[in-house]
Amino acid sequence: WRDLHFFFPHRFSHIRSLYKYVHALHHRNTDPQPFSGLCMHPIEHLLYFSNALVPVIYLRCSPLIYMWIFIHLGLAPGAGHSGYEDHWQADQYHYVHHSKFECNYGSPSSAWLDQFFGTFREKLGSSGAYTGEYKDDYDSKSGGKVWSAQGYLGLQSVDHMAYTCFVASTTVALFWAAVVNPQSAIPVRNIGPVPIGQAVAALVSHGPILFGMLLCLFYDRMSWRWPFHKDRIIGSFGFFAVAGWLVCVLPVYHFGVLLCTP
């Protein structure tokens, strides 16, 4: 379950509208080391740690199962980002992903998924197995520039600042609904016809994704679906979008409902 879950949210986070504002932060590490593992945007932490929510919310497993998965989720990224060196803990599979970006979305245990969908890359050089959108001549055409040409240190661009403000506002709303509202003398139970737990959970789980899509329409010349823009919406793109929603967005929503219902 851990490996299967990792593949779908990871590929989901590479959709341009989510990658640009969320997952790109993690990919600043092109030569990863163990501390790179959990260097993520807060929204990506929600998607990643949703792995631990599924057995508890839907299968009613023991809290010990949740605890074990959560601990493993915290430790595993250190191993998975331990570099390319040939030692017992090395994860060369994921190292190639950080180098080439649009390949090897799974782990060595779920490599068959990458092989089946054409995103498997067996080495850093030219690959005979990879059939995705990344081309080796991108690096030569860039004139030595880094892959993320819009990377920044310091002040954010307008769209990134807007996204940061949105996420910060969402965090405040979550804190209010989960901590402050239940302790008030007359807690708010509905926003119009919608229960407060459902409203805030929808904002936290779906809001960052939809807001990223909206920003891409106005601030990005590339397709919001890149590098999967050539995939059919009713086909492989739709399948992975729905799969990503089911395994990481929906669990966060249901957990939010439980957390924010007074």
Image (cartoon, grey):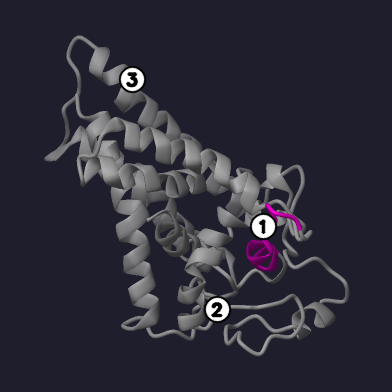
Q: Residue furthest bottom?
A: 128
Relative to 165, does residue 240 appear above or below in the rendering?
below
Q: Can residue 90 be seen in this view?
A: yes
Q: Quadrant of the C terminus?
A: top left
Task: Please tell me which residue lies in front, 36 or 135.
Answer: 36
User: Considering only order in the chain, which callout, 3 or 1, is on the residue closer to the N terminus?
Assistant: 1
Judge from the rendering whether residue 87 lies leftward or rightward of residue 205; answer left or right: right
Residue 217: percent from the left, percent from the top? Answer: 49, 68
Q: Mark 3 points at which residue?
A: 179
Q: How far apart in space, not on screen, are marks 2 and 3 (Cα)?
A: 43 Å
Q: Name the residue under label 2.
A: 119
Q: Residue at x 63, y 57 (%)?
A: 24
Q: Can residue 214 be seen in this view?
A: no
Q: Residue at x 76, y 42 (%)?
A: 154
Membership of 88 in magenta stretch: yes
Helix, strand or loop at label 2? It is loop
Residue 116: percent from the left, percent from the top? Answer: 46, 82
Task: Please tell me which residue lies in front, 217 or 135.
Answer: 135
Residue 73: percent from the left, percent from the top? Answer: 49, 43
Q: Name the residue under label 1.
A: 27
Q: What stretch is highlighted in magenta?
A: 87-98
Helix, strand or loop at label 1? It is helix
